Image (cartoon, rainbow, N blue to C red):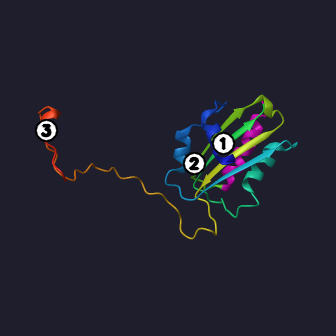
Amino acid sequence: MRAVRGISEMVMKPGLVNLDFADLRAILENAGTALVSFGESSSENRAIDAIEEALKMPLLDVDISGGSGALLNIQCGPDLSLDEIRQIVETVSQELDPEAPLIWGAQVDEELRGTVRVLLIVTGVKTPFLTKPVISKPRKEEKPTIKRPIKIVEEPLEDLEIEEL
């Protein structure tokens, strides 16, 4: 439930740096196994603590090192500095493949003064629970097929005789 709420808020709520559905799709499309994780902190070192909580979820046995892409949404109060945002983004970036795209956004909410919340989506992760990589195949355009010939008639409908099949 928290994942759905976090993703929908990320896409729907305006932010200081906006993320949208195109960003989500760019990271997830054909990217294999993904991790959705959260972190929150109100500590003195809140930026690093929040992202480390998201990266080190104790219930998930997932390795993001070498991940193929990431989407990061930071929710914070107006008191968060650009340096704290930089620390969060760099911490995630160091875990990913050097060529992996990292898209980030930030939403400012007065109610979160003193708090940082992080939503992290990482693709191309490794887990012992999946033995084969899960990669979605691009959709092929389907051509409409006609199962039987269509008879075009120009008579009024009342005058038509309908055949039983």
Mark 3 sits on what residue?
160
- Is 23 on the left-hand or right-hand side of 45? left
Question: Which numbered disc covers residue 5?
Answer: 1
Q: Give the percent coordinates (x, y) of residue 115.
A: 81, 38
Instruction: Residue 87: say if magenta.
Output: yes
Q: Nearer the viewer, residue 95 or 126?
A: 126
**Callout 3: 10 Å neighbours few (<14), some, many (20+)?**
few
Distance from disc 2 to disc 3, alpha carbons, whole Å, reads 62 Å
Q: Nearer the viewer, residue 90 or 140?
A: 140
Question: Which numbered disc covers residue 101?
Answer: 2
Distance from disc 2 to disc 1, alpha carbons, whole Å, reads 24 Å
Question: Which of the two labelled residues, at mark 1 and mark 3, occupies the earlier sequence position?
Answer: 1
Secondary structure type for disc 1: helix
Question: Which image quadrant for residue 154?
Answer: top left
User: What residue lies at 57% left-to-right and 55% top-to-bottom?
Assistant: 68
**Callout 2: 10 Å neighbours few (<14), some, many (20+)?**
some
**Callout 1: 10 Å neighbours few (<14), some, many (20+)?**
few
Look at the image and give the residue range highlighted in magenta: 78-95
User: What residue lies at 78% left-to-right and 32% top-to-bottom?
Assistant: 77
Q: Nearer the viewer, residue 55 or 12?
A: 12
Amino acid bearing label 2:
Pro
Q: Are marks 1 and 3 in contact (CB under 8 Å)?
A: no
Amino acid bearing label 3:
Leu
Q: Give the percent coordinates (x, y) of residue 46.
A: 82, 43
